[in-house]
């Protein structure tokens, strides 16, 4: 019995040490880390920040949104240490700012409607016509006799770039579309408008909005992971040059097993370090 208890205690100790290990990098560190940019990243960044600050009160981590364009600009100008993007950096951005990218998650972009909407699927051709304004009433898609309310994201949004590139084949939304500035704002708009159609990161789908199948592709993280859902992107952390100190420790933590759990819990697919 003593041997069994000793072995069990050893297992618990080993598990405890394994869980503590990723956070050991923050012991003895002090300072502030500022993060901004893509809004899809916020749940992961906040979970990681809370875990870090809970073990070291001498570290302060601020997480803000603003979109991918803001992430590039602020990181490039040294206003934040990590600028998040939902798209790869453009060659001009790398050349101008000397940024280094760290892709850490796979995310799908889902076309979404209000849950009360009868339209749960459409073809890509129909989707392109909807966002071009050629199909303007839900009745044309088998839904209610009601005008379609288009919603899109702001210029510089990584979610928008992925949607336009992969769902609209580089098309753009009609000028009549309402512009919102985050995945959260898009969710709220669609949830409150029974005639709405827009798009969000798949990780943001919940009971308040309904994902729409496109050409038979059902939006889910499982389908994004196995390749059957094609409207996907990578989520990136970007730093000005090679990260060091607290910034490096945070980036490394996101790639750790504990950080990957935060990524999964936020609805994304963890991606190992290249």
Image (cartoon, rainbow, N blue to C red):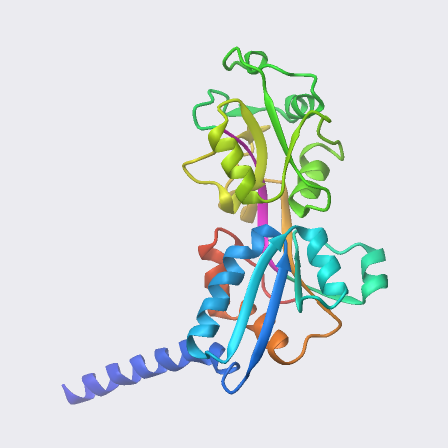
Name the residue rendered at 30%, 80% in the picture.
Answer: 12
Point out residue 250 in the picture as x, y percentages from the top left corner: 57, 72
239 or 20, nearer to the observer: 239
Q: Which residues are magenta?
A: 104-113
State left or right for residue 162 relative to residue 61. right
Residue 228 in view in this figure: no
Name the residue rendered at 54%, 56% in the picture.
Answer: 42
Q: How many marks?
A: 0
Point out residue 11 in the picture as x, y percentages from the top left corner: 31, 80
Vertical placement of residue 198 versus 158, above or below: above
Name the residue rendered at 52%, 81% in the picture.
Answer: 26
Q: Quadrant of the N terminus?
A: bottom left
Residue 94: quarter of image: bottom right
**Main secondary structure type of the part rendered in magenta:** strand
Vertical placement of residue 89 versus 195, above or below: below
Point out residue 191 in the picture as x, y percentages from the top left corner: 47, 32
254 is within the stretch colored magenta:
no
Residue 171 in view in this figure: yes
Name the residue rendered at 61%, 24% in the picture.
Answer: 123
Point out residue 193 in the picture as x, y percentages from the top left corner: 50, 26
Residue 186: quarter of image: top right
Q: Quadrant of the C terminus?
A: bottom right
228 or 96, nearer to the observer: 96
Vertical placement of residue 146 versus 48, above or below: above
């Amino acid at each position: 019995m003593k041997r069994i208890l000793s072995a069990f205690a050893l297992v618990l100790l080993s598990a405890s040490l394994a869980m503590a290990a990723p956070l050991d990098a923050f012991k003895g560190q002090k300072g502030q880390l500022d993060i901004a940019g893509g809004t899809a990243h916020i749940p992961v960044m906040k979970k990681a920040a809370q875990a870090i600050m809970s073990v070291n009160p001498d570290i302060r981590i601020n997480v803000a949104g603003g979109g991918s364009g803001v992430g590039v600009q602020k990181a490039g100008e040294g206003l934040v240490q990590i600028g998040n993007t939902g798209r790869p950096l453009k060659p001009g951005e790398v050349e101008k700012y000397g940024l280094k990218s760290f892709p850490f998650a796979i995310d799908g972009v889902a076309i979404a409607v209000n849950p009360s909407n009868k339209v749960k699927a459409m073809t890509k051709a129909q989707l392109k016509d909807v966002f071009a304004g050629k199909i303007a009433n839900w009745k044309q898609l088998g839904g209610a006799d009601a005008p379609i309310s288009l919603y899109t994201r702001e210029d510089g949004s990584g979610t928008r770039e992925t949607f336009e590139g992969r769902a609209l084949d580089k098309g753009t939304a009609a000028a009549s579309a309402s512009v919102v500035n985050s995945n959260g704002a898009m969710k709220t708009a669609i949830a409150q408008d029974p005639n709405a159609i827009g798009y969000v990161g798949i990780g943001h789908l919940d009971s308040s909005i309904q994902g729409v199948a496109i050409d038979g592709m059902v939006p889910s993280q499982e389908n994004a992971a196995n390749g059957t859902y094609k409207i996907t992107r990578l989520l990136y952390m970007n730093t000005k040059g090679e990260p060091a100190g607290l910034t490096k420790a945070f980036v490394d933590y996101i790639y750790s097993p504990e950080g990957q759990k935060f990524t999964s819990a936020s609805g994304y697919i963890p991606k190992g370090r290249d």
